[in-house]
Image (cartoon, rainbow, N blue to C red):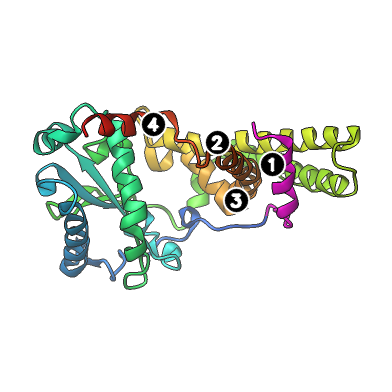
Amino acid sequence: MPSSDFYVNKVAESSDVPTVDEGASGYFSTPSDRLDPSLFHGDVFRDDVRHFVLHTLYDFWGKRFARPETWSTVWAAGSGISYQWSASRGNGDLDILIGVDYPSFYSANPDYQGIPENDMADIFNKDFKQGLWPSTANWRGFEVTFYVNPNSTDIRDINPYAAYNLTTNEWTVRPPVVGADPRAAFGKSYWDQITREKYYAKGLVMKYGSIRNEISGMTPGSPGHTNALAKQRLVVEQARALFNDIHGGRRMAFGPGGSGYGDFYNFRWQAHKEAGTVQAVHALTVVGSEARKEQEIDQYGHELDDAAEALTKASLWARG
């Protein structure tokens, strides 16, 4: 938990109190009768787009690892390759998910043997985010992102609702055909839970703003100030718990035992995106997270690694 000084400084810097405002989700949009012509000829991926994705990935990886084409499979996935592409076209997201055959990877790259697969996925993804995403953030109007799936050499292990294999140029999971009104597929009990959670989130935001106003008029270090600060930290932690529950549930929907696209937890995530709930509670969690980072930098000179990252760095250091 960040110290009171760091926390109150971060609260003071955060002049805007988030609100639960309507967001957007293509999940509930009216489907098109065809796939995005910017990506597909009929239901086959355009050669120029496929070439760009594969060339970009392997040019990047080829400078870092040996023989990447032999231990990876590349998929396009997500709403951008579904029949609901037009709703997400404003953002232009093109999600590229990569499965790694780790035995083959370690054989081709022996310096990394001994580093667990999940930690290697973290290494790949942090490298993508820092070194590749900036250069693919706006390609023909698309934000192209590359991501390695932990524990899923085969993308079907994460129950995607659409996945096109760019390596073999064929569908692995064809996009679902949904009705003209996708909302009608979900019953009243589903929507009732969203309503309850949305009101709970609104209550947290209102409480945060109210306590923040109280703090601004108090003397730092006074009993009232200390108590108000503790109450506000509790609100932030409650917001963090709600966000983690909604976001973590969606991960379960696409993991072992989940049912993917139509899973309740995916519906819940998408409904709260549309309602603005996740955006609001995430904004509240940023206060605590940023305060924690600043405290670590002040005490240690840098942000602390999590346990997995520390172990990975230690493994690489031991290899010289």
User: Considering the image in quadrants, where does the C terminus appear?
Assistant: top left
Q: In terms of depth relative to the viewer, which is nearer, 94 or 174? A: 94
> Which of 174 and 114 lies nearest the eye of the viewer?
114
Q: Which mark is residue 244?
A: 2
Q: Amino acid at mark 4?
A: Ala
- The amino acid beneath tag 1 is Phe
Q: Which mark is residue 6?
A: 1
**Residue 27 placement (x, y as % from top left):** 46, 53
Q: Give yes or no for contact between labels 2 and 4 (Cβ–Cβ under 8 Å).
A: no
Q: Which residue in the structure is indicated by mark 4?
A: 310
Label placed on residue 17: none
**Badge 1 or badge 2: first in the primary sequence:** 1
Q: Amino acid at mark 3?
A: Gln
Q: CA distance from mark 4 to mark 3?
A: 30 Å
The quarter of the image holding the N terminus is top right
Percent x, y of residue 110: 13, 34
In primary-sequence order, the first of circles 3 and 2 is 2
Distance (Cα) linking label 2 and label 4: 23 Å
Looking at the rendered structure, which numbered label has been put on residue 279?
Answer: 3
Residue 191 position, x and y percent, is 61, 42
From this viewpoint, is residue 271 visible?
Answer: yes
Residue 252 figure quarter: top left
Q: Marks 1 and 2, how far apart in space?
A: 23 Å
Residue depicted at 54% across the width and 41% down the height = 268
Q: Closer to the camera: disc 2 or disc 4? A: 4
Q: Are marks 1 and 2 in contact (CB under 8 Å)?
A: no
Image: magenta residue range: 1-20
Q: Residue at x 84, y 32 (%)?
A: 227
Q: Determine the residue positioned at 62% across, 52% down.
A: 276
Pick whichever of labels 4 and 3 is earlier in the sequence: 3
